[in-house]
Amino acid sequence: MSNYYDGLNQKLLAAIPADAQRVLELGCANGRLGQRFKELHPGVRWVGVEFKEEAAAEASRVLDSVVKMDLDQADLSAAGQGFDVIVIGDLLEHLRSPEAVLSALYDLSAPRAKIVCCLPNMGHLSVIERLVAGDISYDEMGLLDKTHSRFFSVSSAFKTFLDSGWLPNLQDQYRVDVTPCAFTNHILQAAMALGVPQNTATFNMGLYQMILVCEKWPMQFLAKPTAPERFSVIVPVNRPWQFNLNIARSPGLKEVGAEIITVQGASSAAEAYATGAGKAAHPWRLMVHQDVYFPTGTGFALAQALGNLTQAGVTALPIGFAGLAGASDGSVSYAGQVVDRTHLFSHGPSQAAVSMDELAVVLHRDAAVRPDPTLGWHLWATDLCLQIQQVAQQPVGQLLEIPIFHNSTNDYNLPAAFHESARRLLDKYPHLSNIPTLCGLIERQAQALVSCQD
């Protein structure tokens, strides 16, 4: 057997939940991963799936059960049902239709199941080097393994899992960091010309393999809505490539026939919203960043949520996807759900938002609030929460539990324009000593942002 079948991926092993009870491993090879996990956690039942007959025979001596099958053709239900953890190590890239396999895993897994997966990153600098050189020669192993059928970057991997009902989080990674040289410097300059910050490009190009832990998105959210509400989508665009890779190809927007209105050249979020709202065919308007991707099922979930609000007569409030919720004692906590760049932000819905991220905000035609043009492109969604809070005398903004993908290239460094918006927000609400946001606490003493949380 080759090293491929004898290897043990230590970071993949470490990412498997210690409380796993019933595990399915796709591509179990000789069974070393499952054998080691069973040594550490004797109570687990581990079922392996392997295509190579010799490897399957060897794995069957150390695992509870091994099923020999070709995952591109076989019915996965033959491996069993009710798995709470599914392990996929260096396999999806070998399949012709990984989406079909992930969808099948959704059906045979337990309600709160997790997938733990290792995938190669085709955005690594070594692959870019060959692309630029014009010689995509395959290798015996590695990122350009000649047996690979599909290629993944971090963003495309996240979209693939999301569209199959799984919520991904980058748990760990193997890195082969880039070495400074003339070629690297030119590639970084090219990335920045696209609007990708140097720190983000360096992170992406040094990432060799990603370790993902994915949570199962409950099926009821993926179902076609019984009381759907049509909505229009307003998208300020200044990077067409970002819009085309995200909003324009979002299956969640296509499944409900959402009206998409692009706005170019706006000087503020308020101007972009007003321009788009003037063209909108529907009373509900979703103002969203160009780098947001709506996976399969999210359109259905949003249409149902808006339909419920319409039936309840709740149309005056701002609605967001990620933010902070207020409590009666004045404390705040995370709320909402979004896959943000490489990590899953999942904290449940709220009807008491005191701040929301402006990555995606829904307003009804009859909403009692509007974006403030003096805030530019930052903190205007938090301002919407403060506007309605003044009217209602309590936090009433809505935060949904719908996992959209914020596929941003941002490097977490806040620009000067953000700090200027923070100062203007403080000036607008002189009675507030501080304003909590997802980016940190805006305090009056410093008249600027003094802390930032990822």
Image (cartoon, rainbow, N blue to C red):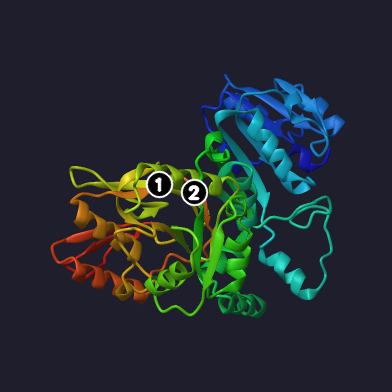
Q: Nearer the viewer, residue 405 or 396?
A: 396
Q: Is residue 392 left or right of residue 272?
A: left
Disc 2 target residue: 229
Residue 106, picture quadrant: top right
* SS state under label 1: helix
Tag 1 and tag 2, C-beta contact below 8 Å: yes
Q: Residues within 10 Å of mark 1 (few under 14, many from 20)?
A: some
Q: Amino acid at mark 1?
A: Thr
Q: Quadrant of the C terminus?
A: bottom left
The location of residue 300, given as percent across then percent down, is 55, 45
* Residue 171 visible (yes or no): no
- The image quadrant of residue 426 is bottom left
Residue at the spot of label 1: 310
Say which of 208 and 113 sits in front: 113
Is 440 situated above or below 374?
Answer: above
Of residues 16 and 415, the one nearer the viewer is: 415
> In this image, 214 relative to 353: left or right?
right
- Residue at the limit of the structure toward the left, as seen here: 431
- Along the line of sight, the residue nearer the viewer: 355 or 191: 355
Q: Position of residue 105 (x, y in %)?
A: 67, 34
Image point (80%, 47%), residue name: 96
Q: Amino acid under label 2?
A: Glu
Which residue is located at x 73 percent, y 44 percent? Answer: 98
| Residue 314 visible to an observer of this rendering | yes
Label 2 element class: loop
Q: Please rate how many residues cluster around mark 2, counting C-alpha atoms within 10 Å: few if below 14, some from 14 to 19, many from 20.
A: many
Which quadrant holds residue 212? top right
